[in-house]
Image: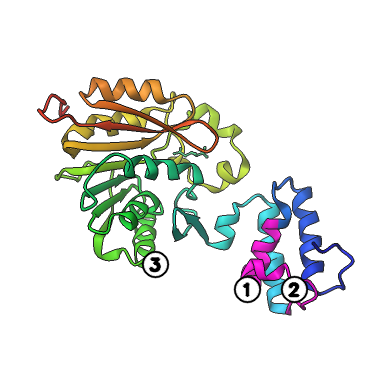
Amino acid sequence: MSDCSDPAGTVGAFLCRAGQHLRAAAIENPRLEARLMLGAAMGREPSSLLGATRAPVPPVAASRFASMLRRRQAREPLALILGRQGFWTLDLAVSPATLVPRADSEVVVEAALASNLPPSGAVLDLGTGTGCLLLAILSEWPGGFGIGVDLSPEAAALACSNARRNGLEKRCAFFAGHWADAIRSSFDLVLSNPPYIESAAIPSLMPEVRVHEPARALDGGPDGLDAYRLIVRALPRLLKAGGSAVLELGLGQAPAVTGLAEAAGLAVQGSHADLGGVSRALVMKKPFGGSASGR
Ligand code: GLN
């Protein structure tokens, strides 16, 4: 670890000063974030900076770093400043058009992979955003293919470029639309991380989310369940018999979404907890024999 005794203009001095600024802005991992931004500004692997504290920071990199630092002090999400976020094993481009992929959402991928479906299955991702859920599944299912839909055309275009970025573009397509309204086929697996925050709770979210992420990807209406009502109602027609849906959940929503799924004739298989112990993914199946209602 360097301290601010490194000579001015060196990596060590920049990291130390930036760490202090970020700490003062109440950023949780100030030194790590400073290193990630300086690495990006210098076009170097961030970990390589640890052993290079005496290296000079070229002026172009220094000014790039200063502007990144200002944005982060204003609580813009680090991923938007870096323009990328790791999710599952993928490197994804991010933009203000979508939510930044969260590590918590990886439990949706785990739950889907554990649900005993054919690895050549057809997958539908509703509200795909960066494409993170669909692309993660396709990266694990070499014979799978899928469709991602998002209300935002910018999100659909971003997901498409993320498919190319990860070499998955031959097995998926993305388009803009309202949930599954334009979908006429059925799938082995339906995924969604819908907006699920109660409208009244939006003002108390952290600034990174409240100010910089799209409200329509977060706001689930008065009780947070608006999107689940629409999605779950459509699942019986979207799923093949024996197919599964895995929906991401907000805090405490498992009972309510279980109720919606059962009312639609789906068999709820259980929920999976995220890294914080929150029930984060609910797995439901369309039974063979067709008792699920298409309404
Ligand atoms: N998990 C996100 C958050 O709390 C919300 C995502 C969503 O509404 N789907 O910031």
Instruction: Tell me the element at label 3.
Output: helix
Between 240 and 218, which is closer to the camera in this rendering? Answer: 240
Q: Quadrant of residue 126?
A: top left
Q: Can residue 179 be spotted in the picture?
A: no
User: Is residue 256 placed above or below 9 in the rendered structure?
Assistant: above
The reply to whether the residue tagged 3 has its Cβ within 8 angstroms of ligand 1 is no
Between 168 and 178, which is closer to the camera in this rendering? Answer: 168
Determine the CA span between mark 2 and mark 1: 11 Å
Mark 2 and 1 residues: CB-CB less than 8 Å, in contact? yes
Between 75 and 118, which is closer to the camera in this rendering? Answer: 118
Q: Which residue is mark 1?
A: 44
| Image quarter (top left, top right, bottom left or bottom right) of the C terminus | top left
User: Residue 285: x, y in percent?
Assistant: 24, 32
Q: Earlier in the sequence, mark 2 or mark 1?
A: 1
Determine the CA span between mark 3 and mark 1: 20 Å
* Residue 147: assigned label: none
At label 3, counting other C-alpha atoms closer than 10 Å, the crowd grade (few under 14, some 14-19, many 20 or more) is some
Q: Which residue is mark 3?
A: 165
Determine the CA span between mark 2 and mark 3: 30 Å
Q: Which residue is mark 2?
A: 52
Amino acid of disc 2: Ala
Seen as rendered, the residue at the extreme left is 289
For image coordinates 35% across by 25% down, the residue present is 257
For image coordinates 28% across by 54% down, the residue present is 141
User: Residue 67: x, y in percent?
Assistant: 68, 65
Magenta residues span 32-58
Image depth: mark 2 or mark 1 in front: 2
Left or right relative to 240: residue 85: right
At label 2, counting other C-alpha atoms closer than 10 Å, the crowd grade (few under 14, some 14-19, many 20 or more) is few
Left or right relative to 254: residue 263: left
